[in-house]
Structures are given as C-alpha cells and as structure tokens.
Image (cartoon, rainbow, N blue to C red):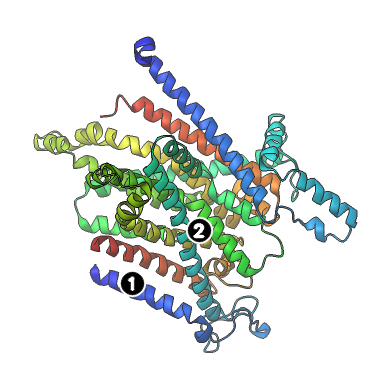
Amino acid sequence: MIKIIFGARGRFFMQVAGRALRSLLVLALAGLAGAALVRLAPGWDVDEAQVDLRLSRQSVERIGAERALSRNPLSFYMKYLSSLTRGEMGRSEVYGQAVAQLIGERFSVTARTVGAGLLIAWCAALLLGTAVALSDRPAVLVGATALTASALSIPAGLLAVFCLLARLPPLAAIAAIVFPRIFPHVYEQVRAGRARPYVLFGRGRGIPPLRMFLWYVLPLAAGPLIALAGVSVTLAFSASIPVEALADSAGLGQLAWKAALGRDLPVLVTITLLLTAITTLVNFWSDLLLLCLGDTAV
Amino acid sequence: MRAIRLLAIVFLLATAAISLAADWLAPHDYAEQFRDHAGEPPSPRFPAGTDELGRDRASRLLHACRTSLLLALGTASLAISLAAIIGGVAGFRGGWVDSALSSLMDLMLSLPWLFLLLTVRALLPLNTSPSASISATAALIGLAGWAPAARVIRANVLSVRNSAPLLYARACGLRDYRLLAVHLLPNLKPVLRAQFWIFVPVFLLTEANLGLLGLGILEPMPSLGSMLAELQNYDRIPSAPWMLTPAFLLLGIVTSLHLAMAEAKTWE
C-alpha cells in the first residue's frame, strides 16, 4: 500500500524510520536494563563511606538513606536521563572530576586505537580470507584455520599481554583480538560465493576470474560482512578494556577498569550507556547500508 | 585428525580428574604463604614456582583448574536453561510472544556486556566471601550470555513446530505441554547439547578476562583467571616464563574443548 501511495522511495524512508525508531527503543531499554542491573546488584547499598572512621553514625545513616531513595531502577534511570539532557553526567568518585570532562578527554584516545585496530583487522581478514578461499591448497586452509582457532582459544587480555610483550602498540593488540573473529566469516562468504552454480557456470564459460570475483562473488559477500562490521565495532570497544588497562593507555577502557576497581558508579554507568549508544548507532548504520544495498546486491 | 581429537578428550578427562582430586594431589594448601620463598622459580619443592606472596603455584593451579571448570559448567547450565526457556517459548508460542522475546534477545545482544559485567561485578559487597564471589560471577556471566543460544534454539523450535509429525500430533488434539515434552524437547536435545559445549569454552575465557583484570573470583580462592592477573606485570615474563603456566593450561583446555566438540558434531 505504502509503495502504491509513496512509491519505492517512500517505502525506503518508511523502512529507515522504522529502523531508527527500533534503534532508539533498543537504546532506551538497554539503558534501563543496565540501570536495573546496577541498582539490583547486591553491593549497591554498600560503599567505603560505611567504614570511613571520619564519618559519624548519623552521616553514614544519611548516606544510606539517600541511596535507598534511588533504589527503584526506573526512577533512578529517569532522573539520570533528565540530568543527561542538561549535560550533567555526575562527578567521578575516584578522579574527583566531572564525568563528561573525563570521558571527553579519553574518548579520542580509544576512538583512535579502536579505529586503527579495526582497520588493520579488517584489511588483514579480507586479504587473508579471500586469498585462502581462492587458493585450492588444503595446507593453506589448515594453516589459517589453526592460526585463527588458536587465537580464539586465548582470552583477549592474554592476547593483549603477548602483543605488549612483543612491544607492539595497543592498536595491534585490538587488531589481534578482532582479526580471528572476522577471518572465518570472510573466508566462508567468499568460499560459498565461489561455489554458487552460476559462478561455476561463468568460470566454465571462461569469464576472467577477477571479473567473476568482483561482479558476482563480492556483492554476495557484502551483505553479511556489513552486518559483521557492526558487531566488530562492539568487539573492538570491549577489547579496549584489557588492552588499555594493561598498556596503561589513558582511554575509555582504562577508565572503565579503574572505575570498576574503585566502584565509581557515575563513570561506569555513563561509559556503559555511551558504548550502548555507539553499538546501536553502528548497527543502525549497517542496517541502513544493507537496506541501500538490498536492491542492488545480487 | 581422529587421533588428535581423541587426544583432546583424554587431555580433558585427565585434567578434570586431576583437578577434582586437587585436595589430595596438591603438595600444599592453595592459600599457604611461604614468605621466605616468594617469587621463586620452579624447584622440586615448588614444581611451578611460587607467586609474589610465596604461595605454591602448582597447588594453586590444581585448585584453579577445578574452580574454573566447575564455574564454566555451572554458568553454561544456567545460560542454556535460560536460552531453552526463552528461545523455546518464543518459537513455540509465536505471534506477539515471539516478537517480544526476539526483541529481548536483540536487546541483550546489543549491550556491551564486558562493560556491564565490570560494573555489576564491581558492585558486589566489599565483604563478599570467595565462594559467594564464584556464585555471583557465574550468575552474572550466565545472565549475560544466554541470548545467542536462545536465537539458535528459537530457530530450531520454529522448524520442528512446523514439521509434519508435530502438525499431525497437533491435529490429533495433543495438548501443548505434551507436544513440548514428547515431541519438541527430544528433537532439541542435540541443539541444546551443542550449544552447552559451545558455551563452556566461551565462559572459561570470559572468567579469564575478568580475572586478568582483577575482577573475577576473590582471593585467596584461585581460578585460572585470577592466576592470570599476575600477568598484569608482563615485563616480568621474560625473566620468569613459568608465570605463563596457567595461560598454557587454559589454552590447552579451550583448544581441547573445541577439538572434542568437532568430534561430537562428526558423530552426530
């Protein structure tokens, strides 16, 4: 019906609007889920103030009562969101600075590391995955699979330790963590594309391999790989925690780690919400790209 | 290849058996501190050396292995139960229930779980006992990790629900609970088993990541993750490579689990 009234373009915009709305809803619900988990954590009512000998019993009771007032996750979340719209994210208990300022200072460090790490990981995975899929030698496949399977059997933090031990920068550690998670998908997509009947037919008819690859195999692989690109951003940001903590790099990952050790709730909640927003935004963009490719992909 | 997989299963069984017998096999108590022998290299008395508090690393490794394996198995059980209930109900009921539960799965998959795990783990009470921290860590990881399996289970339930035997059974007037118990669950067993064994290495690695950051199981209880926390001082590794013993054990266990799973799939 929409197609009849507004045409193909109208339907496209309706789909975009629907996805945008869904992303906003997911972000709002994710924030609420995060707030609820934090509020319901058993140690929410407990903090260092209770064992601070400088505070009187009345002061400790007052702090406890203030905390108990915001025990309801929904009211806490609404209060948090309303202060967020005024640009207030609270004050860090560990650093004694405004959370917005702390995050502003460190976001660029993490964005650079994660961005460069993702670029390296994707380039390596695309090149190696395509090369392995195009090569018909079983030894190459076994070698590449053994390499990625070993990397997947090592915790991200340990992989970061090995990279730092080899005097590699943090972005190399991010790339080492993300690469083994992308490579199998790239390989599988290219391999499956090459095995399609019409690709086999084209090869049999003598169409040059490069043309076959660029015109028929690659467009098929594009859709799933774009979806994977969204997931890999979340992966890279998660990997930034152990990497930055171990490399002593002043980014968001290190901030989150130190905040967790120091029970710095305002920082933790804000970083989690920020990361959820980035994840949702990246997934929305990859959805949008898929939507645009929808009609053109083979 | 079959021989390698068999070797992996033997390694896993041997590791599980040795770690379960840690109380009898460990030369020392895992918390006992030999202050005069802190940071020592391997010796006949301390086969894997001692940590910086003077605790026998080999004894701690045996207990750590048991803790991590039990935690991973417990967490996988919790996650697979949640996934089976949520994915099963979504696939079986369909309609708005399916839409709502599928949205919940999407929501869970879009959360940056490592950040949220750090947050909630950091909020455990300061006086939490080590054994309570095991339960709390397992519960947190389990609650965080069920969504990918729920999707797979939902897809399988959908395909089984629309299969000819189930449509026939429904047409014969079989009630929902009987359809579930007699027809659906037995068909889902291989999927549940496969998802369970996919979860175990994933949760072992998650616990290791949390432990490496000092946010896993509380001291003095050892786990493979908490033993990896020593590696935060990675500059010491070249002069004391035996610090990597827990890392290699973890690598061996996770790799063996992957190989054993591949074998199970082949058998099915």
Mark seen at residue B9: 1
Q: Is residue B75 left or right of residue A64?
A: left
Q: Nearer the viewer, residue A119 or B177?
A: B177
Describe residue B121's horizontal placement relative to residue B103 as left or right: right
Question: Toward the viewer: B208 or A216?
Answer: B208
Position in image of residue A188 (x %, y %): 28, 46
Give, as a three-letter code, the residue at label 2: Thr
**In the depicted structure, whether residue A260 falls above or below residue A276:** below
Q: Chain of mark 1?
A: B
**Same-subunit check for callouts 2 and 1:** yes
User: Marks 2 and 1: CB-CB under 8 Å?
Assistant: no
Q: Nearer the viewer, residue A229 or A167?
A: A229
Q: Earlier in the sequence, mark 2 or mark 1?
A: 1
Q: Secondary structure at mark 1?
A: helix
User: Going 47% across and 53% down the picture, which residue do you hit?
Assistant: B82
Q: Which residue is mark 2?
A: B206
Q: Residue at x 10, y 35 (%)?
A: A206
Q: Secondary structure at mark 2?
A: helix
- State which quarter of the image contains the C terminus of chain A: top left
Query: Which chain is indicated by disc 2?
Result: B
Q: Amino acid at mark 1?
A: Ile
In front of the other: A226 or B78: B78
How packed is label 1: few (under 14 Cα within 10 Å), some, or many (20 or more)?
some
- In the current view of this chain or complex, which residue is farthest to the front? B173
- Res. A109 in view: no
